[in-house]
Image (tube, helix red, strand yellow):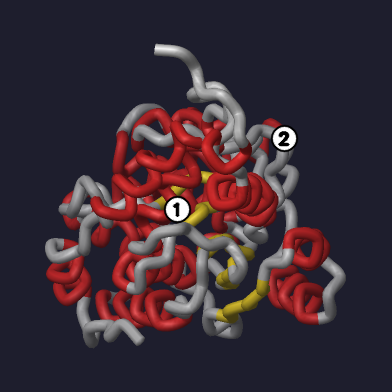
Amino acid sequence: MNKIPAISTLDDVRQILTELPGPDVEAARAAQAREPQLTKPAGSLGRLEQLAAWTATWQNRYPPRMKNPNAHVFAGNHGVVAQGVSAFPADVTKQMVANFEHGGAAINQLCKTFGVGLCVEQMDLDNPTQDFTQKPAMTDAECAEAIAFGMSVIDDSSDLACLGEMGIGNTTSAAAMCLALFGGNALSWVGPGTGLDKPGIGRKAEVVGLAVNLHKAEMLDGLDVMRCLGGRELAAIVGGVIGARLKKVPVILDGYVSTAAAAVLPSINKRALDHCKVGHVSQEPGHKLLLEKIGKNALQDHNMRLGEASGAVLAVGLLKAAVACHNDMATFAEAGVSDKTA
């Protein structure tokens, strides 16, 4: 078991982020050495070849393995919902958690289809964060506690961690964090979320701009952005990303909200997301812009915007295919197939 450092303040998190382990160079070299020997033209499996090598590199072992992937859906409630930024009431968060637990949601079906373990993590649903148009969403201690929780739930026996969320109002939080981190116009980061109409989107953008201006002076890095504008489930995703790095577990992020949560980390350590892939491009309009800002290419685009780690788990099929081809294809020598001529 890889030991997780104790966390009580955001400065503790900042210290951990300066000491993150790097890639396993030997595992990467082993993957690169095997790939040209497999019975196929060089590069013919395209991105699958890269995914197999990436998996080995961040699992810190060779050969890579994809037998025990797990999904973590963090659920939290947001005080900013009081500003009318969502088409659904906050009670829906708790109702959807019950649906997850009874196996009735999309994420349940996707996990069953791809053999992914599902962990639903409730983040104090009876106590929403503060309305961040009035005061910071969380105190330093509350934000640190949520990050520590996210770190703790990652199991070092996992081959992959898919990180997702459920929380009415959290696309508003994601948009506010993106505006604070990367600037631009609030409308560029705001979308319909759970189904807002055009006037609702305009109101949401107004709230986002107001909140960022209110907290601008105290947001000195990404963790400050999370504390002021985030939510418990988003902070837990940050913890999941950090915990996975420490426990040698590669990560698939879900859509806009999950990516926005993780995007607070490169402001402190520019390599903090090297062990992360993004499962899909969300239909939330800010997601494509966010991916450009953090230099990530999503693995898929299926016009989805559900959350729940659905896009991340859908990408597990690609990872399983990549690892299976890399590990189990015959080499030219084993198959008696002639390699290309010199």
Residue 59: x %, y % from top left:
39, 62
| Quadrant where the C terminus is found in the figure | top left
Image position, residue 166 (x, y; %): 63, 64
The residue under label 2 is 302
Circle 1 residue:
55
Does residue 336 appear left or right of residue 146 in this picture? right
Kindly tell me whether residue 34 is visible in this rendering: yes
Which quadrant of the figure has residue 140? bottom left
Query: Residue at image x 34%, y 63%?
Result: 60
Q: Is residue 85 visible?
A: no
Q: Amino acid at mark 2?
A: His
Observer-nearest of 120 and 138: 120
Q: Residues within 10 Å of mark 1 (few under 14, many from 20)?
A: many
State left or right for residue 16 relative to residue 284.
Answer: left
Q: Residue furthest right?
A: 104
The kind of secondary structure element at disc 1 is: helix
* N-terminal-most mark, 1 or 2: 1
Q: Amino acid at mark 1?
A: Thr
Q: Residue furthest top?
A: 342
